[in-house]
Image (tube, rainbow, N blue to C red):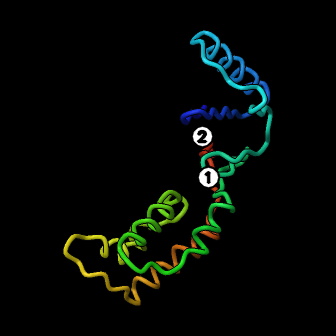
């Protein structure tokens, strides 16, 4: 189970386990006098959008609608724009192997007393991160014994 402010996501390996998890969560909500609006609730979904991700039974994907904002991002013109881009792209860093190393040229622009100079290295870093995020892999939960 994942709880984030007003959202609760319950996930399970199979339907039997899911029914038990659902019962447990509903019991705890009732016991703690917490309420969930039924009209905003969805049950027994095979796929759900949650916190900028698509969660499926076989893994977690980057939500394509969120990635389009990164892909459409214009070349940063100052440190503030670099910080904004890295903040958004960094939210999905777990999907990009070596994210920190790839982002290093842009990260250096955020240091104090460094003049903002968008170099060819920064441009390659920017383009590489955008490309890698559009082809981001699925994250799967490891299964013991496999």
Q: Quadrant of the N terminus?
A: top right
Image location (x, y in percent) of residue 80: 38, 69
Of the pair 2 and 38, the residue shown nearer to us: 38
Q: What's the residue at 37%, 77% (across, down)?
A: 78
Give the foreground label among 1 and 2. 1
Residue 50, located in which quarter of the rendered image? Answer: top right
Of the pair 74 and 58, the residue shown nearer to us: 74
Of the pair 107 and 141, the residue shown nearer to us: 107
- What distance separates the C-alpha of mark 1 from that of mark 2? 28 Å
Q: What's the residue at 71%, 34% (across, down)?
A: 13
Q: Residues within 10 Å of mark 2 (few under 14, many from 20)?
A: few
* Lower sequence index among marks 1 and 2: 1
Q: Residue furthest left?
A: 113
Q: Which residue is mark 1?
A: 52
Q: What's the residue at 59%, 33% (across, down)?
A: 6
Q: What's the residue at 63%, 58% (across, down)?
A: 62
Q: Residue furthest top?
A: 31
Q: Which residue is mark 2?
A: 144
Residue 21, located in which quarter of the rendered image? Answer: top right
Quick check: 73 left or right of 112?
right
Task: Give the SS element for disc 2.
Answer: loop
As drawn, 130 above or below 88: below
Image location (x, y in percent) of residue 96: 52, 65
């Amino acid at each position: 189970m994942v709880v984030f402010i007003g959202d609760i996501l319950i996930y399970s390996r199979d339907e039997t386990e899911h029914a038990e998890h659902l019962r447990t969560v509903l019991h705890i909500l009732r016991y703690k006098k917490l309420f969930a609006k039924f009209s905003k609730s969805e049950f027994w979904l095979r796929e759900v959008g949650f916190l900028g991700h698509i969660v499926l039974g076989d893994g977690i994907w980057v939500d394509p609608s969120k990635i389009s904002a990164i892909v459409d991002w214009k070349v940063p013109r100052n440190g503030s724009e670099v910080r904004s881009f890295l903040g958004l792209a960094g939210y999905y860093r777990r999907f990009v192997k070596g994210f920190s190393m790839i982002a290093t040229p842009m990260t250096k622009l955020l240091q104090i007393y460094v003049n903002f100079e968008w170099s060819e290295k920064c441009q390659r870093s920017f383009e590489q991160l955008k490309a890698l995020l559009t082809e981001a892999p699925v994250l799967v939960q490891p299964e013991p014994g496999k």
